[in-house]
Amino acid sequence: MLAAGVPCVPGYHGSNQDPKFLEAEADKIKYPVLIKAIKGGGGKGMRIASSKAEFQAQLESAKSEARNSFGDDHVLVEKYITTPRHIEVQVFADKHGNSVALGERDCSIQRRHQKILEESPAPHLPDATRKDLWAKARSAALAVGYEGAGTVEFIFDNDTGEFYFMEMNTRLQVEHPVTEMVTGQDLVHWQIMVAEGAPLPLTQEEVEEHIARSGHGIEARIYAENPEMGFIPDSGRLIHVRTPTTSEDIRIDAGFVEGDDVSAHYDPMISKLIVRGETREEAIRRLGAALEQYEVAGPVTNIEFLKTICRSPDFIAGEVETGYIEKHREELFPEKKIDEEVLAQVALACLHRDSQAASQASGGLAGSAIGFAPSYQQRQLSFTESKGPQSEVRNFDVRVQQTADRTFNIEVGGRVFEQVESRMDPVSHIVTSFFPTPAWTQPSSKTRTPFAFQQGMQYRLTVPRAKWMEKALGMKDVANSVLAPMPCKVLRVEVQAGDTVEKDQPLVVIESMKMETVIRSPQQGTIARVVHQQGVSHAPFLCVLDSPQARGV
């Protein structure tokens, strides 16, 4: 690349993989450094070492993940730019010596070095820099005699305005629909034509004319993952899926439909939502509105988090970088309040569900009203909300008094809703209540999790088990156990029974959906027991801590 005039990040890209040698190279580059699998992609096999003290641990983790993902643990070590943007250029080349750049995509909104949002054109990029990026990307493709579709990825330094070659992916990428939105071209069709030996259908000048009049495109990746638990992937049955209405300016590429299972063994992406607007501001508004139409019940998704990004002032202003989420953590993860009206609606949905089940069990004798006794005695329903294993749990109590067929009084947290009219469609399970706000609510008897979608927001609650049921099922108190946050395979156990550990010390390394996660100690204490060893799959809990907090000391 250097010979072709393409700037590269300072670093070591050789074949010597001795850990001490790589650490010495990192010392020369100066910390922080980026350790990256040479066959990497999607952020896998990539770690940041902020100091010499953590280099070897990060190197081992990067190599392990690279070996598991790509069958090759070779890595490179490069200078880590502290305020970077991830900008890539879509290129095409044919057998006749033609090469074009179809604009650039800014992919800076990321977590775990994996993209969440991609947009084209990149915001606040000087025109001269934009054209230089395109030229350098074409030079990179021509330097290796490339044919077909490729993506040349660059790191752009926000501090200096300089950019460096990072890698070239020899394929169309997940975010190629963004480029299709702003060029009006079918890039898969282009691939087929080039493979058949045809010349590229457009020149560079013609491509630029299309881009100049096509506005702005943004793609959001819909993942089965829990943003509030460090974006850990989730899995399970998609109980209910409702997607936004599509048009020329709203496109959905989906890999799953309602009823499918999101597996713990593969990437957790469910779908891609791509929008276009005449301006970037219009595209962001259109993306936010489309996300409000999206409904997924089952695994936890990142949809609510994506909505928050769309409302973030710095994102709207185009002030992006790869560390955006961490730098805006307080803004992007606010404490969320569940309105009393939502809790009332969830309670009504659960009662409707019970009534329908009773009606079916009795052959329809229960009628259309909720299955109360003639006196319409008051019912109390309890719900809990938590962000994940070992997180704070919030409890809610709702009292419902039926006053007539399909009419109820509801008390939630001191607030009373009187004479609420409510019914549930027996097919769609849409509960319509006169608050007046219609909402779709799906209580699932299998997961004990009511999902409510109301006014463009999703709410996820749990119906707690009664204490007698927990005792009957033999459920144990795991307050002082370290739980696996997702279905997983245990890759490494870093401690053994009797070890004294500090808060945040690594205990176990697990793998799920091709991603490694380090499970750290939630508190200071002593390891009383290691429940699962290396190689165990789908471990529910991993270690038991004997701590001063557990003993009440």
Image (cartoon, grey):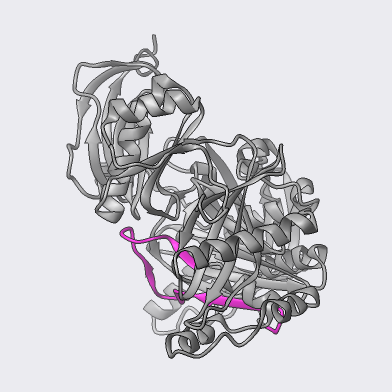
In front here: 539 or 180? 180
In front here: 387 or 411? 387
Residue 30 in view: yes
Q: Quadrant of residue 267?
A: bottom left
Residue 60: within the magenta? no
**Place of residue 402 in the rendered image (x, y in percent of width and height, measured from the top left):** 63, 64
Residue 252: within the magenta? yes
Query: Of all residues shown, which one is farthest toward the top?
Result: 553
**Place of residue 165 in the rendered image (x, y in percent of width and height, measured from the top left):** 54, 51
**Place of residue 236 in the rendered image (x, y in percent of width and height, measured from the top left):** 38, 62
Q: Is residue 199 left or right of residue 127?
A: left
State the extent of the magenta-drawn residues as a range.
247-270
Which residue appears at 63% of the width and 83% of the height?
185
Which residue appears at 56% of the width and 40% of the height?
394
Which residue appears at 36% of the width and 12% of the height?
548
Q: Is residue 333 left or right of residue 11?
A: right
Q: Which secondary structure type mostly characterizes the magenta part of the structure?
A: loop
In front here: 351 or 462? 462
In the displayed structure, would residue 108 be above or below residue 529? below
In the displayed structure, would residue 455 be above or below residue 126? below
In front here: 537 or 252? 252
Residue 461 in view: no
